[in-house]
């Protein structure tokens, strides 16, 4: 009985921590929108960016329009894509406009921190990337265009990355309905830069390197060093040279950024004549065998 209670308390504690971190990440995202995106008037690849444009046509605040758009998109997502959108997406989609509304109430006369639209967009991109990367690492999102991208992926068979880019660019171009050419260009460039920065913050940190090593005389030493000093796994393949027909063993290991630096230093010192090839790896997974 006590074991079950301890397990329940542990699960509840993890849930509370997850909600706290998600709330903090959503607060950072909302701050980026209110303090940088709204003053710039740029519609940078987000539902909040579209809300900034729409606020010029309807007598509602950006937070209220964002809430309406997110709810509509959530309903559309559930109807068109089923239950792919979990509690985390619903939670952050609703919480984001709530936080933006809180800023609107607390700082109603806020204009701009930098006084320059271009700087505001740059600050928005880097600040929102922090919040979104935290959400991504928790398998959550801020909803909005993520839902649009999933719908496009399912029904138009479009790659998720391309769907996100296309929907973001449509939002950016919507600023032409209200603002001048400078703001439209700023929205488009901001959308492009936003995608690059998010790739770095979210995907760049997860990239590993697949290192293939062929050594004539130091194969055993290099293999032992990888296994016992670097504490990394390795796979051995036989490779036959096309020119001389000699069969040699190829050591293949996958390492992170820090391990890669250590491995390169060791191999260069141990066997300067070793032949190496290096590939970037962005995704690794184990696929279990299905039962009979």
Image (tube, rainbow, N blue to C red):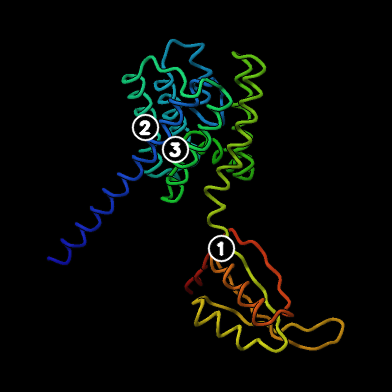
Which label's residue is closer to the chain start, 2 or 3? 2
Compared with residue 149, is residue 49 higher up or lower down, i.e. above or below? above
In the picture of the structure, the residue carrying the numbered disc 3 is: 142
Q: Quarter-wise, where is residue 99 in the image? A: top left
Q: Residue 65: x and y, percent?
A: 43, 21
SS assignment at label 1: helix
Residue found 47% across the figure and 20% down from its top: 112
SS assignment at label 3: loop
Image check: 187 left or right of 244? left
Between the C-alphas of marks 2 and 1, the distance is 37 Å
Depth check, front residue: 261 or 283: 261
Compared with residue 118, is residue 20 higher up or lower down, i.e. above or below? below
Q: Residues within 10 Å of mark 1 (few under 14, many from 20)?
A: few
Between the C-alphas of marks 2 and 3, the distance is 9 Å
Q: Residue 195: x and y, percent?
A: 59, 40
Which label's residue is closer to the chain start, 2 or 1? 2
Question: Which is closer to the viewer, label 3 or label 1?
Answer: 1
Report the quarter where the N terminus lies: bottom left
In the picture of the structure, the residue carrying the numbered disc 1 is: 257
In the picture of the structure, the residue carrying the numbered disc 2 is: 94
Q: Residue 235: x and y, percent?
A: 60, 79
User: Is there a contact, CB below 8 Å, between mark 2 and mark 1?
Assistant: no
Residue found 52% across the figure and 49% down from its top: 202
Q: Residues within 10 Å of mark 3 (few under 14, many from 20)?
A: many
Depth check, front residue: 221 or 64: 221
């Amino acid at each position: 009985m006590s074991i079950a209670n301890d397990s329940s308390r542990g699960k509840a504690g993890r849930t509370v921590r997850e909600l706290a971190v998600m709330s903090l990440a959503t607060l950072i995202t909302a701050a980026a929108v209110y303090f940088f995106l709204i003053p710039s008037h740029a519609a940078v690849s987000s539902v909040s960016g579209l809300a900034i444009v729409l606020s010029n046509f309807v007598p509602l605040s950006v937070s209220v329009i964002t809430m309406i758009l997110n709810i509509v998109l959530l309903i559309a997502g559930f109807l068109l894509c089923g239950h792919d959108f979990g509690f985390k997406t619903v939670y952050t989609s609703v919480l984001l406009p709530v936080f933006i509304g809180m800023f609107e109430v607390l700082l109603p006369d806020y204009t701009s921190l930098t006084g320059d639209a271009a700087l505001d967009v740059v600050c928005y991109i880097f600040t929102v990337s922090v919040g979104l990367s935290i959400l991504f690492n928790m398998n959550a999102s801020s909803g909005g265009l993520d839902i649009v991208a999933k719908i496009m992926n399912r029904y138009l068979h479009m790659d998720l990355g391309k769907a996100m880019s296309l929907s973001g660019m449509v939002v950016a171009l919507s600023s032409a309905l209200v603002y001048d050419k400078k703001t439209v260009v700023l929205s488009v460039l901001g959308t492009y830069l936003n995608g690059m920065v998010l790739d770095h913050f979210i995907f760049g940190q997860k990239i590993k390197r697949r290192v293939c090593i062929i050594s004539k005389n130091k194969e055993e030493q290099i293999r032992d060093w990888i296994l016992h000093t670097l504490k990394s796994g390795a796979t051995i393949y036989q490779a036959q040279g096309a020119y001389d027909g000699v069969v040699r063993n190829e050591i293949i290991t996958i390492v992170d950024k820090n391990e890669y630096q250590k491995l390169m230093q060791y191999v260069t010192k141990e066997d300067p004549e070793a032949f190496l090839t290096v590939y970037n790896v962005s995704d690794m997974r184990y696929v279990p065998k299905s039962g009979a």
